[in-house]
Amino acid sequence: MPDQTGSTPVTERRIVRERGARKQAEQLLEQKSRELYLTNRELQEMALNLENLVDERTDELKVARDEAMAASHAKSAFLANISHEIRTPMSSIIGMAELVLHSPMAIEQRQHVQLILDSARSLLTIINDILDISKLESGKFQLEVEEFDLFELLDNVVEILGIQASDKRLEIGAIPANGLPARVIGDPVRLRQILLNLLGNAVKFTSHGEVRLRVEVDDYSGDRVRLFFEVEDTGPGISPEHQDSLFDKFSQVEGGHTRRHHGTGLGLAISKNLVECMEGEINFQSQPSQGSCFWFKVMLKIPEVTLSADHSPARGKSVALLTTNPFLSESVPALLSSLGAEVSLLADLESLHAVRERERAFDLLLVDHLTLCEIDPDLNLRQAIEQHGSINTVLLNWINSTVCDKLGSWATRINRPLTRRKLMDILTPVVSPGSHAYVSKGGEGETRVRRILLAEDVPALQLVMKAILERQGYTVDIANDGNEAIEAVRSQDYGMILMDIQMPEVDGISAAREIRMLPDPSKASIPIIALTANAMKGDQDTYLVAGMNDYLSKPVDNRKLDEALMRWFVDTPSK
Ligand code: ADP
């Protein structure tokens, strides 16, 4: 029954029950909120801790990174220093061995000294490789920027590797595509180094066949040109499992052919670094037993003003090439057309006669002596040409080849490897009749006695340099340190000073500065060439700022010394 408020006992019970339930729910909510609050606080604390931990770790990592960078810099500084320390005695060993080889000796002794020289040179190559890779990795490396002759560089690398290649009867040569710029701006020394590495490997690993160096323009953009170089060989190739790591440092294909060859395993790693410095890329294709083909692209600049020198000196001349050799058929025409000449390829005597009959006169006939011996064992060609009498004939020969001895003195010969320079030399009498390509330069030299001051503190190097310079007809005075050098210049006239950088008491840089301030202008302006075992880029600028004119790295390369003497003695009055 309803009470006075109108509610029944059933409704009341339900209300009480609902209140109880709500209270319970509220308590549960409160408890959960408290738990949530506590968890949240815990999470905040953890986040804070984590942040602190991350900060701490970041600081630790920064310290570790700074330490690693300092260690890496210390490593390169150490390497630069140690390389100086190693190069100085190496210079003495190489210089002395070269000197001794110039003196009369028994055959056996000569072989021993040659071995010392070869070992010292290969040790120096290893040291240079290690120094290079450390310079590249330490970020201290900078490319030179200078204008150079691209064709001369190609000739140079082919000549250098040509000796080794000819010993193995390997064909080697550059194949320049049409339209290559004759002069470019970049770092010729480093480009040469990449090419020597790739060509050196190709010659080293190939036992028969050919090594081709193809060069072409990949792309022109504004005043820049991207060049494409390709070194293809007919060597053993590289198996797929070794291909991935080939550009890694110290990577050499184990076992197999590699063990028979020397090498540091640094050449390709250095080349890759250098190519990347030149905004390029490097890669290769290779199949076992099918040879390898390494290629790279580099960006160079084209000089604004093209030099007036004629880069197609044989323009309009026509040359016939008699050969069945596929390598010569590709490389010789490419080299000749880079000189501007027109080339007709002849594979047999009939085609030669046919061309002659059509009265097509050639300015020059190049004959591959092996093809000739094959297709014309009775030497009918020789007779035919001798009867005709007029055509200039040149035999393309191998060094020390006896195959064509029966040809006697018929025709001029040029030895492989064929380069643009050699072809130019044989074309010279054709291009400008009256001149002689083979004029001996001996005998006409003037004997001006010229005096050089050599400032160098290491006695062994004094001896070597003095002997080399004296052999070339210079008078040499020695100064043992910078002070002695300044004194010598005050009291004597010199045509040139070769100044070591690191000397006791007064070093080369300070001595050069003092000499530049001498009151007598003729003394203050003597050419000073720095001699340095420390070949780091940047040092060179210091020498030039100190008033030096040029620098030579130790061990002094005879050719570079000659070039420096030529450069700085020109126009210097004889003393
Ligand atoms: P190195 O020649 O001093 O050993 P590189 O870095 O120049 O070092 O070459 C690494 C390795 O790659 C070589 O040892 C050789 O196994 C392999 N290689 C390079 N070029 C050739 C090639 N043209 N033919 C066959 N193998 C090659």
Image: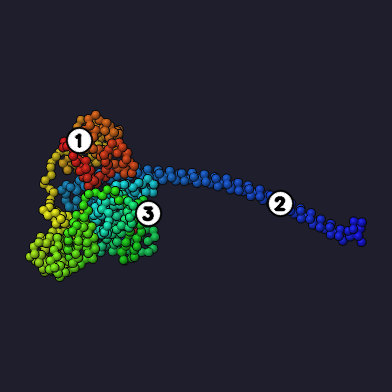
166, 461: nearer the viewer: 166
Disc 2 or 3, which lies upstream in sequence?
A: 2
Q: Is residue 507 left or right of residue 365?
A: right
Q: Residue furthest top?
A: 519
Amino acid residing under circle 2? Ser
68, 12: nearer the viewer: 12
Mark 3, residue position: 249
328, 164: nearer the viewer: 328
Mark 1, residue position: 494
The answer to whether residue 417 is visible is: no
How far separated are the C-alphas under marks 2 and 1? Answer: 97 Å
Q: How is the image coloured?
A: rainbow
Q: x%, y% of residue 389?
A: 8, 62
**Label 2 residue SS:** helix
Amino acid residing under circle 1? Tyr
CA neighbours of label 3 inside 10 A, class few (<14), some (14 to 19), many (20+)? some
Name the mark nearer the viewer: 2 or 3. 2
Q: Is mark 1 within 8 Å of ligand 1?
A: no
**Label 3 residue SS:** loop
User: What's the mark number on residue 385?
Assistant: none
Disc 2 or 1, which lies upstream in sequence?
A: 2
